[in-house]
Amino acid sequence: MSLSRRELGFVLTAGLLAPGAALAQGAKASSAVELARTGESLKPGQWVWAPQIAPKGPVVVHVDLSRQLATVYRNGVRIAVSTVSSGKEGHETPTGVFTILQKDADHRSSLYNSAPMPYQQRLTWDGVALHAGGLPGYPESHGCVHLPMGFAKLLFGITPMGGTVIVVGKAGDPPAAMPQAAGVVGATPTADPAPTDGKDWRWAPEASPAGPVTIIASRSDRRAVVLRNGVEIGRADVVFPDEDFQTHVLVCTGVEDGVPRWAYVGAPGHEDEADRPLDPDLMAKTRMPDGFRTAVRTVIVPGTTILATQSPLAPDTSGKHLTVLSSGR
């Protein structure tokens, strides 16, 4: 039986044929400094995992296609780095901010001859996912993000359904920062949005009764959308207090007396923000309908994610799964 390059890469990654595959078992690090140093020198198939650096808190996965690296943050702190293999030419991995729509440890492809996709974490319903697969040192998948087997298993164990995965950059390009101006699929830019009058908002938590919560705040639309388990449960007009046009991702690290605490995720391009708390005055100065603010607070728990972006939002996604921010495939 002959194997394709993709199938052979998978077998090698799984450690079934190559004695040297032990290199992909994963390095250990005892500190953030050691993890950063090790993460900068990984070869294809290698990874480093140091969960003790941040034992608890919400998890965000950041995939940089230009570096072919995946970085895992917990509570806004980097705890793991792995090499990846993304989509090859003609099957490029889409960029953006996604929610995990499905998890299946023993998944097989419905598109490519039932090819094994161990520890699959689905990002789109048309077939893009994180999973264990071939790692030849360059993009060679059909759009998925391939991970080392051991890393994929560990990552599968700490990510929640509806968790956040950020994919940026382009294979072969200089290393990327956070996404800046990609639009939501189906979005229509708003040229001159009117300030909120406190009336334009809706709230339907019954559309998705449980699951991780993500809040997307668009400065161009002056609007915020609340997703639970990837389904929209509310939106409202919002006016922001500053002119920061960068994209930021924050996670809720705790709630005290009904008031959430937020910390920035220090993704590439924003390393100086890692674990930095959000100024409470910024949140207090953000104008939104009082009823909406009160409703949103009832669903914010540790692990809730905020994506602040200049990009426009889709006009209406009620009751539908949504790719939060995507620039296409």
Image: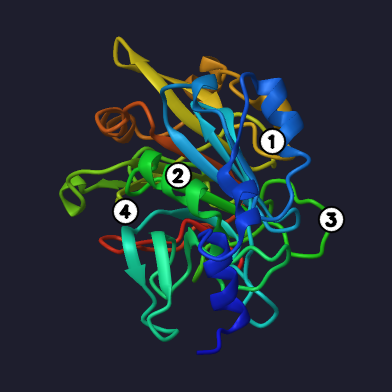
The residue that appears at 75% across and 51% down in the rendered structure is: 176
**Tag 2 residue:** 155
Which badge, 4 or 3, comes first in the chain's sequence?
A: 3
* SS label for mark 3: loop
Q: Find residue 174 and name its label.
A: 3
Give how far across and how far down residue 269 sits, in percent.
Answer: 74, 39
| CA–CA distance in space, label 2 to label 1 | 32 Å
For the residues labelled 4 and 2, the Cα–Cα distance comes to 26 Å
Residues at badges 1 and 4 in contact (C-beta under 8 Å)? no
Task: Give the distance between the C-alpha atoms of the residues marked 4 and 3, in whole angstroms.
Answer: 35 Å
Q: Closer to the observer: label 2 or label 3? A: 2
Secondary element type, mark 1: loop
Give coordinates of residue 95: x percent, y percent.
61, 61
Rate crowding at label 3 as few (under 14), some (14 to 19) or many (20 or more) other CA atoms within 10 Å. few
Asked whether residue 188 is in view, the answer is: no
Residue tagged 1: 244
Q: Are marks 2 and 3 in contact (CB under 8 Å)?
A: no
Which amino acid, mark 2? Leu
The answer to which of marks 2 and 3 sits earlier in the sequence is 2
